[in-house]
Amino acid sequence: MPAKTREVAPGPGPRQVRTEAGELLEVPQDWTLLPPGDAALTRRVKKAGPTWTVKQRRGRKSFSLGLWAPSKHIAALRSELELERAKPEYARKLEAGRQRRAVAQADYADEFELEILSFLNFAPRHAGLARRLAAAISAHAVPVGSGTVARTKRIPIERRAEAATIAWLRHQTTGYDSLTIPRVKGMRREVRRLLAQRSRELLERYRRGQVVDPRSCPLERGLAAVAAESEPDDLL
């Protein structure tokens, strides 16, 4: 049984887990729980096998609590990794990787902002507003770890840009964040669908080139709110 790699849930005891079938298992005495946080070590321990990855579900998401694996595997691979990390070439490799990711991130941010501009498709009189809006949405959605739709690869970038725009409008130009939505299945999705429809209708005004007073413009108010949130506190 310990020789089989599994994905499990936490059990009632500190060294107990439950399988997907609900079976309660005792963790082998010579195994140790490797907490999450060191991706390189985790990958190596998994490759060495066997392991039991502990995941806890919260709503529709699951979170890793670490993985159980033979103590000798974890100790040996941790020592091996520490020796590698102490070498100068490892630091150079790490820095080169950071630079590559930074360049890729900057390129993606530029591409994503252009896709948002394309989706907005505002009339020339609102071109300046469109650029500021695209920049604000991209700045919110693109950063690594933002957890937004911009980070997914499951849908084309043009759909990501559209979804990120609608999400930004929902939070910045509607009362969504202060709504009390009944805990009824499908209700939140329906509310979001209705607000998305309103957001699309709002965008059409700018696409048609309608004159909009900046003082009452929902988009300008949303941008102002975002700018106010990002301003540093006055320490004087």
Image: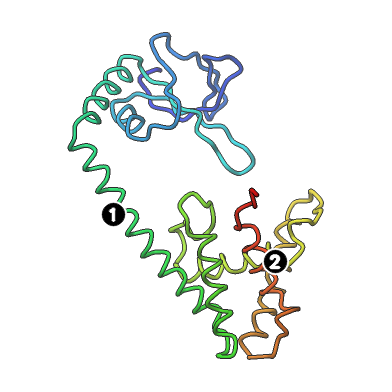
The residue positioned 33% from the left and 53% from the top of the image is 101
- Mark 1, Cα crowd under 10 Å, few <14 / some 14-19 / many 20+, is few
The residue positioned 63% from the left and 90% from the top of the image is 208
* Residue 164 occupies quadrant: bottom right
Per the image, the residue denoted by label 1 is: 100
| Element carrying mark 2 | helix
Using the image as rendered, state which of residue 3 and residue 181 is in the foreground: 181
| Element carrying mark 1 | helix
Q: Looking at the image, which residue sits at the far front?
A: 236
- Identify residue type, mark 2: Arg
Q: Looking at the image, which residue sits at the far top?
A: 29
**187 w.r.t. 79: above or below:** below
What distance separates the C-alpha of mark 1 from that of mark 2? Answer: 38 Å
- Identify residue type, mark 1: Arg
The residue positioned 19% from the left and 31% from the top of the image is 87
Using the image as rendered, state which of residue 49 and residue 119 is in the foreground: 119
State if disc 2 and disc 1 touch (CB < 8 Å): no
At which x and y percent is residue 207?
A: 61, 86
At which x and y percent is residue 148?
A: 54, 56
Left of 46 or right of it: where is 154? right
- Mark 2, Cα crowd under 10 Å, few <14 / some 14-19 / many 20+, is few
**92 w.r.t. 197: above or below:** above
Left of 43 or right of it: where is 139? right
Of the numbered discs 1 and 2, the one sitting upstream in the chain is 1
Per the image, the residue denoted by label 2 is: 193
* Residue 140 occupies quadrant: bottom right
- Quadrant, the N terminus: top left
